Amino acid sequence: MSDIASRVKAIIVDKLGVDETEVTNEASFTNDLGADSLDTVELIMEFEKEFNIAIPDDQAENIGTVGDAIAYIEENAK
Amino acid sequence: MELKRVVVTGLGAFTPIGKTIDEYWNNLVQGVSGAAPITRFDATHFKSKFACEVKDYNPNDYFDRKEARKLDMFAQFAMIAAEQAFQDARIDTQAIDQDMAGVIWGAGIGGIITFLNETRSFVKNNEVPRFNPFFIPKMISDIAAGHISMKYGFRGPNYGTVSACASSTHAIGNAFDLIRLGKAKMFITGGSEAAINEAGVGGFNAMQAISTRNDDPTTASRPFDKGRDGFVMGEGAGSLVLEEYEHAVKRGAKIYCEVVGTGMTADAHHLTAPHPQGLGAQKVMANALKDGNIKPEEVDYINVHGTSTPLGDIAEPLAIQKVFGDHAYKLNISSTKSMTGHLLGAAGAVESIASILAIKNGIVPPTINHFEDDPEIDSKLNFTFNKAQERSVKVALSNTFGFGGHNASVVFKALD
């Protein structure tokens, strides 16, 4: 697992209170990991903080799974 | 329209002197003080360096991490006390009409810990607005009622009451009225507060409202004593299940006592100081008695507001003498704030519980820390100083008064 992937997953485990094994690349925040709309906003903010990036709202809407988040950050993190 | 009778069928307490009803009551009767040096933050530079905190509180003992993160401490305390009351009342949510079960919850301030933390990070981040999406729903003081309703599926009337230190008495009074009117069959009601942080202590210090007896915290809350110098901040929660009498009987519920009357008035006088003759306090007690069809002579015990402030502790006894006449000298009076500190928005709930347990157990908890009479307070009144007294209590009155001049009283009566 890449460094970015493990950091993304650590944030998800922490914020959503889920088990690490549930946080697969395919897992959807809302359908599989029990996040509501506010949780999702909080996750995006945590990613921004951790990786020092800004994720515009229209991009954030497309981040629905763990894999989406990792891919976006790998592409955009400095 | 015939009003329904209302009874108390469940209690919960999470306080500086006990985290269960039994522990709370035993420490009340034994006269235990909950005051100690502040542990929640570094109070070195504060005028008051002590408070009545809930001891050894760790949210992870009660909530999973995700849940705890979404609840300000005042809402955490609410959930803990409500769960105790819910369990005590042995409510089977499948067997009741959840559309007729509500939640009314008092908090004088609400999520001030959350507010301060979020404001701090805003300032730290050069005022770039990156507020947590849970900031508002953690902070707003009605949210405790919302959380409780979601946990138990109570879909009836649901809101918060805000009247500073009278908040949870207003909550109890509203719940009582709505059941009387037939608009609900039961309520989880009460109140909670968690304001022992830099903003809470610093703010009350600036008002010169709280005690600065830093060399002797456990004797600082000394209502009606000559040396009193302000209240001691407390925190925690109290919860009551109120229920329509017939409904309670039908499901075989344990009944503590009846709620018979409530009074609500305003001083309409000053932001923080009581009316010198306690006019609002007189009226609120008289209204509560009249509402409950109780004669003054029937009252055995008054759990007073008695915060240990210089002015408030003079006005309230004067009001009692006006309302009760000669009977004022025959009833027991006590301020349990001498032990718990002042739980602000939760005060009415935890003190109502003390009043209810006085009826149940035939014991009046004391006003501890009495050292010297104040010549401005009639020493012939029985303030139950320093030691609990055994007494058959049929009728108990609980008073609370809040900054803003809000007064609320509630009358409890042993079930006939």
Image (tube, coloured by chain):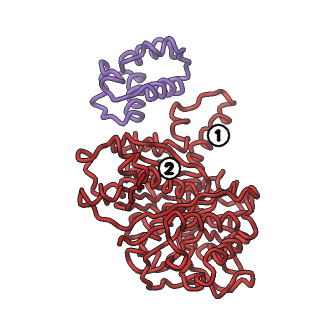
Chain colours: A purple, B red
Which residue lies under the disc numbered 1? B120
What x and y, as percent, mark residue B220? Answer: 64, 74
Marks 2 & 1, CB-CB < 8 Å contact: no
Q: Residues within 10 Å of mark 1 (few under 14, many from 20)?
A: few
Would residue B281 be seen by someone viewing this image from the given angle?
Answer: yes
- The residue positioned 54% from the left and 14% from the top of the image is A56
Mark 2 element type? helix
Mark 2 vs mark 1, CA separation in Å: 17 Å
The front one of B234 and B312 is B312
What x and y, as percent, mark residue B175? Answer: 45, 52
Would residue B59 be seen by someone viewing this image from the given angle?
Answer: no
- The residue positioned 23% from the left and 47% from the top of the image is B95
Amino acid under label 2? Met
Amino acid under label 1? Arg
For the C terminus of chain B, the image quarter is bottom left
- The residue positioned 59% from the left and 58% from the top of the image is B264
Subunit ID for the residue under disc 2 = B
The answer to whether residue B176 is left or right of residue B234 is left
Mark 1 element type? helix
Which residue lies under the disc numbered 2? B73
The front one of B316 and B351 is B316
